[in-house]
Image (cartoon, rainbow, N blue to C red):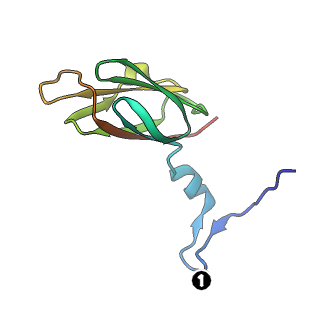
Amino acid sequence: MASELRVNTLKDAAGNNSIATSFVAGGSAKAWLYYASQATVDSLNISGSTDTGTGVLDIAFANDFGNSNWSGHHTTDYQQPYLSDQARTTGTAKLLNRNSSDALVDATAGNGTFHGDLT
């Protein structure tokens, strides 16, 4: 039997530092990943990643976003990592890694966070 906890505000153990649960739910990352050598090492809400070419990593979200207007941030050990807006869907993202010469290169390590409303 599933249980349910309904609260409007969270506070620390001393009863201070209150925050609305809507702020926590709305402001928390809905997915994140850390990868090395183009393979996912650890993640939340990522069902898989696929190395689809030099410097290109496609990821799939385990739970889709409500629309394709979610926000993401991607960093790597190279100077120009970015998310491809052309491949953004409710259930997938494409991470691209470019070096300082603007050539696609595989990142030694990288990470990403994704924010938005889940379905």
Image height of 57 relative to 114, above or below = above
At 44% from the left edge and 34% from the top edge, which residue is drawn? 40
Image height of 88 relative to 116, above or below = above
Across and down, in percent, residue 23 comes to: 56, 57
Name the residue beneath numbered marker 1: 14
Judge from the rendering whether residue 8 lies leftward or rightward of residue 20; answer left or right: right
Q: Residue lying farthest top?
A: 53
Mark 1: few/some/many CA within 10 Å (<14, 14-19, 20+): few
Across and down, in percent, residue 76 comes to: 28, 38
Q: Nearer the viewer, residue 36 or 55?
A: 36
At 23% from the left edge and 21% from the top edge, which residue is drawn? 104
Amino acid at the residue labelled 1: Ala
Q: Residue lying farthest left?
A: 101
Q: Nearer the viewer, residue 109 or 32?
A: 109
Q: Nearer the viewer, residue 66 or 54?
A: 54
At 58% from the left edge and 75% from the top edge, which residue is drawn? 12
Judge from the rendering whether residue 106 lies leftward or rightward of residue 26; answer left or right: left
**Residue 44 shows in the view:** yes
